[in-house]
Amino acid sequence: MPNERLRAVMADGGWTYATLAQKVDVDPKSVERWVNLGRTPRRVTAMRAAETLGEDVHALWPALRQARAARAISPELVALYDQRADIPVSAFVDMLTQARKHIDVLVYAAVFLHEAYPRLNELLRERASEGCAIRIAVGDAESENVRARGEEEKFGHGIESRCRLALMHYRPLIGVPGIDIRTHGTTLYNSLYRADDQLLVNAHVWGVNAYGAPVWHLRRSGEGGMFDMYAESFDAVWSTATPVQHKG
């Protein structure tokens, strides 16, 4: 059944399938299916579309009001760790070593990787040389959000120093084909470590250093799951991050 409410709202606002799709970052055919076939998009996408159109998401897609049964365990959840310190660095290294297509790292600093595994840059070079696309985003030490995180952790200016140290570790990789290093100034709710369809999510907890916060290990099992939500989050931060240039 067509979604006449959505059709009317789009017509009133002068939106086409293509213009709304571009704004919401989906395929125009998806928007067409929302309108003509009454399809309901994923909740995150629906909320983004509703915000763009200036409408209540539940007025456009009433089905989203229906409570979904809670699942005891997500099919994508491989393991849950009480704190990052419980995970041996070898687990991070093994995951990155297995990557063939994508390695994404989004952190403020995470200097523990280089400190515990000095060959990290060599590993990343090897992965890139075999066609793996590598994106590393570390915190901008001058960012207000980085400074705020330091205050939350009660480390004072320590986090800013760690951000600079992390960038120093990664600098030798700047200009290596297949490797892109950027700095970001976002409020970071989780540190993300992705290798193809595996992802380690290190939660950020107010007043707690990341090493003492929980980590969940996800493996992608299909479209629209938890893995994709975090992957989209990485892409959103990456689009705002600043490429690091060679020092002149």
Image (cartoon, rainbow, N blue to C red):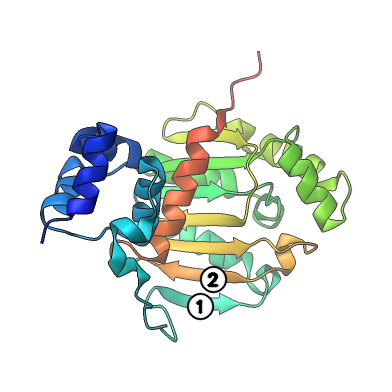
Percent position of residue 166, x then y: 69, 42
Alpha carbons under labels 1 and 2: distance apart: 6 Å
**Residue assigned mark 1:** 79
Q: Residue at x 24, y 40 (%)?
A: 10
Q: Are marks 1 and 2 in contact (CB under 8 Å)?
A: yes
Disc 1 residue crowd, few under 14, some 14–19, many 20+, Cα 10 Å: few
Q: Which residue is mark 2?
A: 216
> With respect to residue 129, does 68 lie above or below?
below
Name the residue located 61 percent from the left edge and 32 percent from the top edge. 172
Three-letter code for the amino acid on which mark 1 is drawn: Ala
- Give the secondary structure at mark 2: strand
Residue 39 left/right relative to 71: left
Based on the displayed image, in which of its 4 quarters is residue 226 positioned? bottom left
Please, is residue 160 above or below residue 91 in the view?
above
Amino acid under disc 2:
Trp
Residue beneath the point at 21% across and 37% down: 11
Provide residue 87's location: percent of width, then percent of height: 63, 71
Q: Nearer the viewer, residue 181 or 148?
A: 148
**x and y percent of residue 167 in the render?**
67, 36
**178 in relation to 132, above or below:** above
Sequence-wise, which precedes: disc 1 or disc 2?
1
- Mark 2 Cα within 10 Å, few/some/many (few <14, many 20+)? some
In which quarter of the view is residue 116 placed? bottom right
